[in-house]
Image (tube, helix red, strand yellow):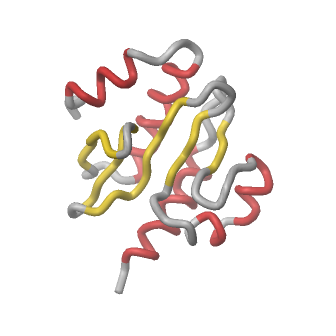
Amino acid sequence: MTLPEAVAAYYRAQPEPHRTTLLALRERVLRVIPTADEVIKYAMPTFVLDGKPVCGLMAHRRHIGFYPYSGSVLGEVPDVVAKYGGTKSALHLPIDKPVPISVLRSLIRAKLASLKP
């Protein structure tokens, strides 16, 4: 999948090891939702399905933020939150070690379930 220029520019602007981790997370997210569009939303790369944001990734000084664009999604995966930490709306991931795809799959499934009427 071709990376939109605005999204590519975001990744290029990040220092190491953030960039490498972000790109590995991107690849894993796209393995879970391969038809997602990639855009910049709220100043971060965001994966969108059917016009709805599913998740976003953002580099911070001491962590990578995973944003499910819903305050309720992280409550659905308390074991993941307990392992990585975060806030009500963001999971804080290590800057130098991408999380396993199984973790991303759990987060994305919880978000997709929240989108169903």
Instruction: Give the residue furthest to the right.
Output: 82
Q: Is residue 87 above or below residue 77?
A: above
| Residue in view at x 39 percent, y 58 percent | 54
Lateral position of residue 110 relative to residue 84, left or right: left
- Res 17 → quadrant: top right
In this rendering, the count of numbered labels is 0
Compare residues 80 and 57 and report the one nearer the observer: 57
Quadrant for the C terminus in the image: bottom left
Vertical relation: 114 (above or below) 89: below
Q: Residue at x 22, y 61 (%)?
A: 51
Locate residue 61 relative to residue 68 in the image: left or right.
right
Foreground residue among 71 and 79:
71
Q: Position of residue 99 (x, y in %)?
A: 63, 40
Screen quadrant of the N terminus: top left
Residue at (65%, 39%) from the top-left corner? 93
Residue 18 x, y percent position in the rendering: 56, 22
Using residue 47 as the reference point, say whether residue 83 is left or right of it.
right
x and y percentages locating residue 113 in the rendered image: 45, 75
What residue occupies the far front of the structure in this picture?
A: 42
Where does the image place residue 90, in percent across and percent down from the top left?
59, 52
Task: Residue at the far bottom: name it.
Answer: 117
Say left or right for 60 vs 44: right
Q: Is residue 13 above or below residue 36?
A: above
Q: Residue at x 34, y 57 (%)?
A: 53
Q: Above or below — where is 84 with respect to 54?
A: above
Asked where in the image residue 92 lies, by quadrant, the reply is top right
